[in-house]
């Protein structure tokens, strides 16, 4: 593989004053700080304030006060803020990418792509939100004399807990729809990657979002999470299945809703008629994009016996040709893992697989010569479910190749997992490929793509099934989940029940006859 080994030069935009201003937005009364470091070098970026339970409660108090005025603002005026924000986010994409790279270590190509997610979400819902949130009048039980109107009310204050792998996309995009619906937001980003969402909030306020409406609290999950959930009216979480289960249990005890986008062990099925050159390019991104730190990334590839060896040769060569490096320009195709701890976790999965009989095709080791948390693109064979890499989410640049005997066999293997977040099917016969995709137990299925087409389709809900989550982002559901439904029913005349003095048997006869008539005429 091609290496870029020069020590990276931190962008001049990331000044001490700029970073200090960003972290000053965190609700904190001086209860300690956390060293937020540049992933490429391990050097200190800024001391990140940590929030105490009292700080979190204060954040919710201030958010609720701001939310009352925001909810009373018309949807048209709320959307004007996001029209202005869209332009600011696009204009500042390069600065956003600087922050994302410094805090997460991803390559710049991926950082720029991440910076585009909130504008894409804004653009979709700017066109859709007013219609979704408008009252919808329907007929009541008695034609002409009754009506029922569905009214969407904001939840109140939404708690958003965002992960480190896409801190800007999740921290801001998930909050945008909550804000559009009339809610306030209290965000808890991961300590490692708090800078880019803080900058996103700054841009939203520059676009006219009321100050105090979007709060930020920081700290380790066990320290911050319980108080956040106990004060929220709804929780949006992206992260591991284990943590998601804990959050869902606490939300349930509080009788509040939650949306959980959790882990995956995502399969790719390559059909006999697939164009292997296209599959290789798609798999490079699906497996190694963001250094494998994408919830929807591919960790298992299933190939027909007749094409296995051909694909293996091509994919190995393509993986070994990837440019890996620590750089703030667009050169590297692969960046760093997010931390040394995570690099060690990925290494443990690879070592466990090799110790239990897996075969290493390429890669398999860390690259401290490039940076503290770099890891080579890794391809394995003969991986079984008894191995960590065969059953657990590795969440790194590691993939296992598998053979299958028939399409039914491939589908059975793809579904042999507790997860169901994303899947990919490749073939030139689109109808046949789609038919295979429909049989995979997954919330997202991409045909002739690994993951981006499904996730970037903002008009369609995206979520997981089985142990990969509850609920969805995007689509109408991605906005309406942040609302409660009020059923406003009106009865114009007192006709529900027997008239005074009317024989009840006559009343029942008339009622049943009315039901027959309404069904026959299609009125009800």
Image: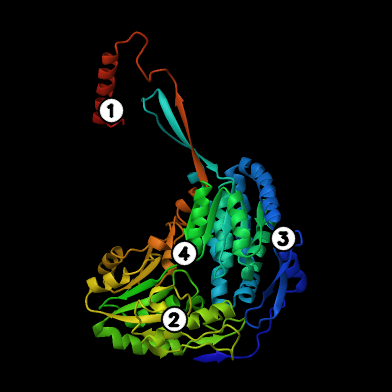
Q: Earlier in the sequence, mark 4 or mark 3?
A: 3
Query: Tag on residue 25?
Result: 3
| Secondary structure found at label 3 | loop
Q: CA distance from mark 3 to mark 2?
A: 37 Å
Q: Residue farthest to the top?
A: 501
Q: Which residue matches tag 1?
A: 518
Q: Could you say which quadrant of the image residue 388 lies in?
A: bottom left
| Left or right, residue 226 beside residue 265 | right
Q: Is residue 222 above or below residue 305?
A: above
The span from disc 3 to disc 1 (Cα, nearest Å) is: 59 Å
Q: Earlier in the sequence, mark 4 or mark 1?
A: 4
Mark 3 or 1: in front is: 3
Report whether residue 20 is seen.
Answer: yes
Q: Which residue is mark 2?
A: 398
Q: Nearer the viewer, residue 53 or 508?
A: 53
In which quarter of the view is residue 175 placed?
bottom right
Disc 4 target residue: 241
Tell me, yes or no, if residue 123 can be seen here: no
């Amino acid at each position: 593989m091609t290496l870029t080994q020069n020590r990276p030069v931190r962008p001049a935009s990331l000044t001490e004053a700029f970073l200090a201003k960003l972290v000053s937005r965190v609700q904190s009364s001086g209860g300690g700080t956390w060293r937020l470091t540049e992933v490429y070098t391990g050097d200190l970026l800024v001391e990140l304030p940590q929030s105490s339970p009292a700080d979190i409660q204060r954040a919710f108090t201030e958010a609720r006060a701001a939310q009352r005025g925001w909810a009373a603002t018309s949807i048209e005026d709320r959307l004007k803020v996001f029209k202005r924000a869209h332009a600011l986010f696009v204009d500042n994409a390069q600065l956003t990418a600087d922050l994302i790279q410094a805090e997460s270590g991803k390559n710049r190509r991926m950082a720029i792509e991440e910076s585009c997610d909130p504008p894409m979400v804004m653009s979709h819902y700017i066109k859709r939100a007013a219609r979704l949130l408008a009252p919808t009048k329907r007929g009541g039980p008695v034609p002409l004399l009754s009506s029922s109107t569905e009214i969407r009310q904001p939840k109140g204050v939404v708690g958003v807990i965002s992960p480190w792998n896409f801190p800007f996309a999740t921290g801001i995009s998930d909050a945008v729809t909550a804000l559009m619906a009339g809610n306030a937001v209290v965000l808890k980003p991961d300590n490692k990657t708090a800078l880019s969402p803080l900058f996103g909030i700054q841009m939203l306020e520059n676009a006219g979002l009321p100050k105090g409406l979007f709060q930020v609290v920081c700290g380790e999950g066990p320290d911050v999470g319980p108080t956040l959930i106990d004060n929220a009216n709804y929780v949006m979480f992206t992260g591991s299945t284990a943590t998601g289960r804990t959050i869902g249990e606490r939300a349930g005890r509080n009788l509040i809703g939650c949306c959980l986008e959790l882990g995956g062990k995502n399969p790719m099925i390559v059909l006999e008629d697939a164009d292997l050159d296209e599959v290789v390019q798609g798999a490079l991104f699906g497996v190694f994009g963001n250094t494998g730190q994408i919830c929807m990334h591919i960790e298992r590839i299933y190939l027909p016996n007749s094409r296995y060896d051909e694909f293996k040769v091509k994919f190995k060569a393509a993986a070994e040709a990837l440019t890996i490096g620590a750089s703030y320009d667009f050169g590297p195709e692969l960046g760093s893992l997010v931390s040394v701890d995570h690099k060690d976790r990925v290494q443990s999965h690879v070592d466990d697989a090799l110790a239990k009989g897996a075969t290493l095709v390429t890669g398999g080791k860390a690259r401290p010569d490039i940076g503290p948390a770099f890891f080579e693109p890794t391809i394995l064979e003969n991986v079984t479910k008894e191995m960590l890499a065969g059953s657990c989410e590795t969440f790194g640049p590691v993939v296992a190749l598998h053979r299958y005997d028939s399409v039914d066999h491939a589908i059975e293997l793809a579904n042999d997992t507790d997860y169901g977040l994303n899947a990919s099917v490749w073939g030139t016969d689109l109808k046949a490929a789609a038919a295979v995709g429909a049989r995979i137990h997954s919330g997202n299925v991409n045909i002739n793509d690994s993951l981006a087409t499904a996730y970037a389709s903002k008009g369609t809900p995206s979520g997981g099934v089985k142990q990969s989550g509850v609920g969805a982002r995007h689509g109408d559901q991605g906005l309406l989940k942040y609302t409660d439904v009020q059923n406003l029913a009106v009865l114009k005349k007192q006709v529900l029940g027997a008239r005074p003095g009317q024989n009840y048997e006559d009343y029942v006869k008339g009622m049943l006859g009315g039901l027959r008539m309404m069904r026959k005429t299609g009125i009800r």
